[in-house]
Amino acid sequence: MPAFNTFARLLLRLAPERSCACNIIGRIAAIEVIGLQREFKGGVKAVDGIDLEVASGEVFGFLGPNGAGKTTTVRMLVTLLRPTGGHAHVAGFDVADEPAQVRRRIGVALQDAALDPLMTGSELIELQATLHGIAPHTFRTRGAELIERVGLSQAADRRVGTYSGGMRRRLDLAMALIHAPEVLFLDEPTTGLDPTSRLTLWDEVRRLRDEGTTVFLTTQYLEEADQLADRLGIIAAGRIVAGGTPAALKSEIGTPHLDLVLTDRSDLRRAREVVAGFGDQRPATDGCHLSIGLAHGAADIAPILRALDDAGFAVAELELKQPTLDDVFLAKTGEHLEGAAEAEPEPELV
Amino acid sequence: MTAATVALARRALRNSFRRPQFLAPLVLFPTMFLAVNVGGLERTTSLAGFPQVDGFLDFQLAAAITQSLLLGGVSAGIAAALDIEGGFFDRLAASPTPRLAIVLGRLLAASVIAALQVVYFLVLGAIFGASVKGGVLGVLCVLAIGVVAGTGFGALGVMIALRARSASTVQGIFPLVFVVLFVSTAFFPANLLSPPADVVAAYNPLSYIADGLRQPIAFGNALEPLLEALAAAAGVAIAATSLSVLALRGRLRQA
């Protein structure tokens, strides 16, 4: 089968309009990762043998807490970091052996949009286009289109140093798209943004998906992954702990859970004993005292409340929650996902 | 490659002019130094063994140009280090930009700034009475030596930036510029230097560069010092550019 993959890649290289690799079942794969590793000095394994496959035209969400290995993975896939083990192909080319080919086919918007604050938006677009070998008459038209598309027409001739965080991210996205890349890497594109800017970027990602661009999106936001990703890979401590569509992952976890806030939290240990027979208890999320998985869904609520009442516990608040990606993360790692809570929004400058 | 080099050079130049706090010291500091030296040490020209010159300004102009070009190298290094610190270098590295263009673009900008520095000091000298004895050809010689030397100093700055990856470290070499300059013949002729400065100056490429810059300004055109200066400047430029390309490769390999 590896021989088939190599043969397929050779064939596809002869037909540049379809330069993606085929996987072993013949489906077009924009990104193929097998046993990818990155070990840093001191033996720290930031990425510890991950396998991934991203189909052409899909939005793949790469979800994980800070320090899980998301950015290290992206940096390897965009050729900024050499893998210390395993293989990765992007747009049909090996990131370690054919980095120049990979760079021609990818768009990259890294975490902390690295934009020159002394340049204007238009100048940066022009520079990026030149570096991609795009002819001036082409990039002027395309650059203007992209700037308009990301809503920066009014600010295009202002220096980037005067832009807000959201505007920088949008410009970064426009720059990443200037050469119409086959695969677009977005590394935590909405971290630290205000809700409006976040929604604008989400719309743009959806539009890119509709246009057939493959998007590799890393995020620490559950909602973002849930909203945008066709499929997800969840990474923790450098390993992939779960993968699939958001719906499949949540249904894998199965049951909803009941979050309870008690009026008196002085004897939570006894309260847990009271509800022990009704379902598996989970680490309580922020703001609640008990969290119980409900094997029979909402039908379990009344018996639990009665049992607590009989034992002398009064319930101040309760909430029935359907499985979320945080539950998936919890089920796979035993911990809640950091960053599930919203980051402090950054004010948008006008 | 050429388009990318020119685009990156244009960016570096544009940024230099948009960051006057980096550009101004390249000429202001040597100008002040020149004013203090010429104003306070004019009688140096009366010392036995001091070459025959119309005035101390004619002699010191080359020192100011050399000093300015060295500061230009520090400035190019700081700008390159800021690109690394700010992540712009990663943006370039993740694009299909030819690797060599990342260094050459910066050096092309350094050479243009070097030409402007030379012109500034020649005009300043002319305003205060120091005409170039070598005429138009002499001016062209000074420009040529200045541009090649400025490119070399820029390459040294870029090399240090690629190794250190920190603007503050590159800034830290600023005092070293003066040490290296003072143990050359930039400020005083070789025969008036005491040991061991005279020995160090004999091996210091800055001596040959400063003497070559000085020749057409203070004495008129003469082939030997001009060729020596060009050779020294080209040697610095070739060696430093090679080292900075190696540093770039090392940095990309470490990634």
Image (cartoon, rainbow, N blue to C red):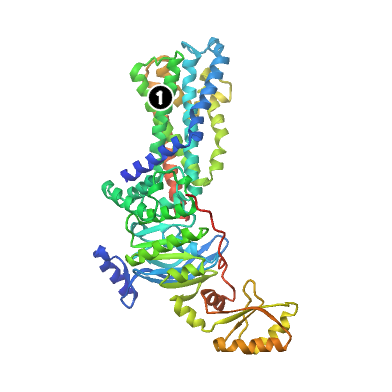
Q: Quadrant of residue B183?
A: top right
List x then y, in percent, for residue B10.
Answer: 37, 39
Q: In this picture, is A260 found above or below B176?
A: below
Q: Residue reaching furthest right?
A: A266
Q: How many marks?
A: 1
Q: Secondary structure at mark 1?
A: helix
Q: Position of residue A147 (x, y in %)?
A: 36, 52
In the image, A321: left or right of B237? right
Q: Position of residue A10 (x, y in %)?
A: 27, 67
Q: Nearer the viewer, residue A1 or A221?
A: A221
Amino acid type of the residue that numbered disc 1 sits on in the rendered structure: Val
Q: A187 or B166: which is nearer to us?
A: A187
Name the chain under label 1.
B
Using the image, determine if residue A120 lies above or below residue B222.
below
Is residue B120 or residue B183 the one in the foreground?
Answer: B120
* Residue picked out by circle 1: B119
Q: Viewed as shown, does residue B176 lie left or right of A134?
A: right
Q: Is residue B177 above or below residue B198?
A: below
Q: Would you say residue B250 is visible in this rendering?
A: no
Residue ID at (45%, 22%) = B211
Callout 1: few (<14), some (14-19), or many (20+) C-alpha neighbours within 10 Å? some
Q: Is residue A18 left or right of residue A172?
A: left
Q: Is residue B243 above or below residue A230?
A: above
Residue most extreme to the left: A15
Locate the N terminus of chain A and report the quarter of the image it occupies. Answer: bottom left
Whether residue B62 is visible to the viewer of this picture, yes or no, is: yes
Residue depicted at 41% across the width and 42% down the height: B242
Kindly identify the residue that appears in the image at 51 percent across and 26 percent down: B28
- x then y, percent, for residue A277: 64, 90
Residue at screen point 70% across, 82% down? A314
